[in-house]
Each structure stands twice: as C-alpha cells, then as structure tokens.
Image (cartoon, grey):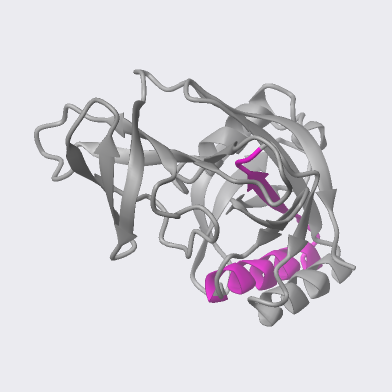
Amino acid sequence: MKFPAPLVEGRLVRRYKRFLADVELRSGGTVTAACPNTGSMLGCCEPGSPVWLSESDSPTRKYRHTWEMVAVKPAASGRAVMVGINTGLPNRLVAEAIEAGVVEELTGYASIRREVAFGEERSRVDLLLESPGRPACYVEVKNVTAAVTAGVAIFPDAVSERGAKHLRELARLKGRGLRAVQLYCVQRGDVDEVRPADAIDPVYGRTLREAMGAGVEVLAYRAKVTTTSIVLDRRIAVDCI
C-alpha cells in the first residue's frame, strides 16, 4: 500500500481520549490529529516521538490529519524503528499481500470479500476467501505494534474480549469443516516472532491455544514500514509455548 501523498512529519505532544493526538509539526505549529487506534498503543505513544500524519482535503472532516506511524526506540539498542499504528489498514495490507502471492498459505482463491457477518456471537470476519469446489476460508486479521522484548512482538497490548470472541468463532468454523485462519499483521520490521501477551490478557492467550488445538491456523506476517508505503513482505513465527 502506497500513501497517495507525502506524509506530514512532526513530534507527538500527547495522545488522549483514545481517538486524538496533538502533534507539533516539523514545519511549525501544532495540530490535533485523529488517532485510528483505540488500543493502549503500548510503547508507541511516548511524548516527543517522531510521528507521521496523512492529510485529507475533505471539507467534512473535523480533523484534517490522521496519525499513521511513529518511530519508536526498539527493545534492544539500535536505530529507531518505524511502526504503523493505523488499525484501519491491516485488512487492506493482508488482502494486497494475498493477491500478490506473498501469503503463500492463502493463495489460489477466486475471490476475497471483506467484513462478512458470521458466527454465533454477532461477529464480522475480516476476509472471506472463496473458490468453487473448496471450503471457504475465514481470515481474522489483528494489527500488532507492541514489542517489549528484543525481536518479539506481542498481542494484544490491552485486554481484548473481542479478540477472544473471534478466536472462538474461528474454532467453531473449523469444527464445521471450513478453513479458519488467525493472521497477525505486524506493522514493524524489527521482530521475528509473535507471542500472546499472557501477562496482559491471559484469557486471550488461553483462547488462542485452544483455537490452535481445534485446528485454527495461526500465521504472522511482518510489514516493511516507510514514510511512503507499508507492505507485508515475509512470514515470521508464532510462539505460543
């Protein structure tokens, strides 16, 4: 995914009310930007961090700017790493990667539909892959940004009842003979594996392991994040031990 226009650079003043962030622009002045991430943003919202915003010219928007990425200090010493924080992008990133053949495990389907209602708990699956003559494939996508140990990303970064619900739904689908996939979209390039954040949400971690035991496939793909584009480029490990 390429950004249609150059991003605006600044420094984070504060993130507040979950949906808002004040940013001091490099060009001068301070703006309030929409924050498209309702999670805790663990490690990704430190005041003073370099951030990049997209800008809209829509006259109906209350906030012209949207926070897209942040440069964070990695868990190990070294250069800062770019992290994509916009939770509205992962479905698009994964769909593009599937269509480009990057996600080899999910190639060969004739169609991809997004946000399809399913399950017993009033859920909507992120991607539904279909082809005549083969079981439908339900793909739930989760955005991963947190890394508290060198080389290791974690999910979730806050208690996620919704995430656990989706895992239960996927396990039920698998029990009906359909294909069910949990895919972690890791929007940072300094990690090589994803682990459940058991210390933050033990229920999610337990539900993930139960879903895997029921046959739900669990994948993680890492993105290359730059100020011009975000692209999933390779698979990384998922470690639930």
Single out the residue that lies furthest toward the left: 59
Q: Nearer the viewer, residue 79 or 227?
A: 79
Q: Nearer the viewer, residue 17 or 121?
A: 17
Magenta residue span:
161-188
100 sits left or right of 82 in the view: right
Residue 143 horizontal/vertical position (percent):
58, 51
Q: Nearer the viewer, residue 84 or 170?
A: 84
**Identity of the residue drawn at 65% across and 41% down:** 129
Q: Nearer the viewer, residue 60 or 223?
A: 223
Residue 75 horizontal/vertical position (percent):
69, 52
**Identity of the residue drawn at 41% across and 61% down:** 38
**Residue 184 painted magenta:** yes
Single out the residue that lies furthest toward the bottom: 203
Quarter of the image where one finds residue 165 = bottom right
**Identity of the residue drawn at 81% across and 55% down:** 217
Number of numbered tags placed on the structure image:
0
Residue 196 horizontal/vertical position (percent):
74, 66
Residue 110 seen in the figure: no
Residue 111 horizontal/vertical position (percent):
61, 32
**Identity of the residue drawn at 48% across and 46% down:** 85
Q: Which corner quadrant holds the C terminus? A: bottom right
138 sits left or right of 133 in the view: left
Quarter of the image where one finds residue 166 = bottom right
